[in-house]
Image (tube, helix red, strand yellow):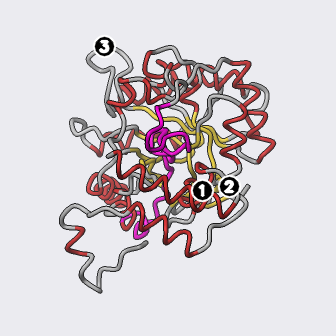
Amino acid sequence: MEHRFLGASGFKVPVLSFGTGTFGGTSDFFKAWGSTDAQGATRIVDVCLDAGLTMFDSADVYSNGDSETVLGEAIKGRRDKVLISTKAGFRTSPDANGTGSSRFHLTETIHASLKRLGTDYIDLFQLHSFDALTPLEETLQTLDDLVRAGKIRYVGCSNYSGWHLMKALALSEKYGLSRFVAHQAYYSLIGRDYEWELMPLALDQKVGAVVWSPLGWGRLTGKIRRGTPIPEASRLQSKVVVDSGPPVDDEYLYRVVDALDSVAEETGKTVPQVALNWLLSRPTVATLVIGARNEEQLKQNLGAVGWNLSAEQIARLDAASKVTKAYPYWHQDGFDRNPNPV
């Protein structure tokens, strides 16, 4: 398994991480993803470690904390063999302070995560979303305190806009606080908005991309094509899941899948393996958070590494997935002193 440095840090992570949204399944939303129990999770961790995949990503809101609990059971006795990333910031209780990135909420939720995970430190902690109501200085100082206390080793954010991320980095530099080394962001062959502003920012500021939903919210599994019904086992059968995920025009999806089919046939790989490999060729990408309901799906996704697409195949996938950028990015593309990183 290849490892890459995470942003401007000396911390190396495997290029594939395992997303534990399928662990627990104790809410309607997450039940559509999967409901792996501790025994099944232990087997998945076994397969991951055998393949060199050592990083496992969770969040306090995944199945109301049960995802972290199941992960904690699965890694019991081998904490030193794994890297744990988790997230917080969304609502975890109806209390007035049960949400956001305040010192109060972050301190409470991190201690709860540590207990559920059965560990005394988190390797990578990420703010799950931007909190516009809490002063950013308060949030960053809290994270720095937790790093100094040894409860967190590295910090990052998730789902930030460009100005959110740049403001946080600037404040960290101004006050000498622990700096975001990672941005967990949505990026896929059918969701390339990340390239417009966040990728150039990440290149300039050396922030590693931890990519969530690299298969486009389950649409790039190779099972969704023109004239083919959505598989019964797909998370896309759940309206609450579809409505919560990134929207994709059907014709755009089919165009990209056609190109993936073509490349998959040439390489002897599967559609998801090609889609994941394409992402690993992109600037700033440190690791892809892959998910799996079962061992078979996991082994399929693990086949995305250890080989490379040709330049012509990458160009073909680029062309099939290209869309008109939002302003001002389409305008900036016309200026030769503002080169596109991809």
- Check whether the beta carbons of the residues at disc 2 and disc 1 lie within 8 A of each other: yes
Mark 2 residue type: Lys
Q: Which residue is mark 3?
A: 94
What distance separates the C-alpha of mark 3 from that of mark 2?
A: 47 Å
Instruction: Classify mark 3: helix, strand or loop.
Output: loop
Mark 1 residue type: Val
In this rendering, would 187 be left or right of 337?
A: right
Q: Which mark is residue 274?
A: 1
User: What quarter of the picture does the N terminus occupy?
Assistant: bottom right
Tell me which label, 3 or 2, sits earlier in the chain.
3
The segment highlighted magenta reads: 201-230
Tell me which label, 1 or 3, sits earlier in the chain.
3
Secondary structure mainly formed by the magenta segment: loop
Q: Which residue is mark 2?
A: 269
Snapshot quadrant of residue 310: bottom right
* x, y percent for residue 4: 63, 60
* x, y percent for residue 33: 52, 26
User: Is 257 in front, or is 208?
Assistant: 257
Question: Which residue: 33% across, 20% down?
Answer: 98
Question: Which residue: 28% across, 44% down?
Answer: 136
Name the mark nearer the viewer: 1 or 3: 1
Question: Which residue: 57% across, 24% down?
Answer: 68
- Check whether the beta carbons of the residues at disc 3 and disc 2 lie within 8 A of each other: no
User: Is 224 in front, or is 106?
Assistant: 224
Tell me which label, 2 or 1, sits earlier in the chain.
2
Q: Is residue 218 magenta?
A: yes
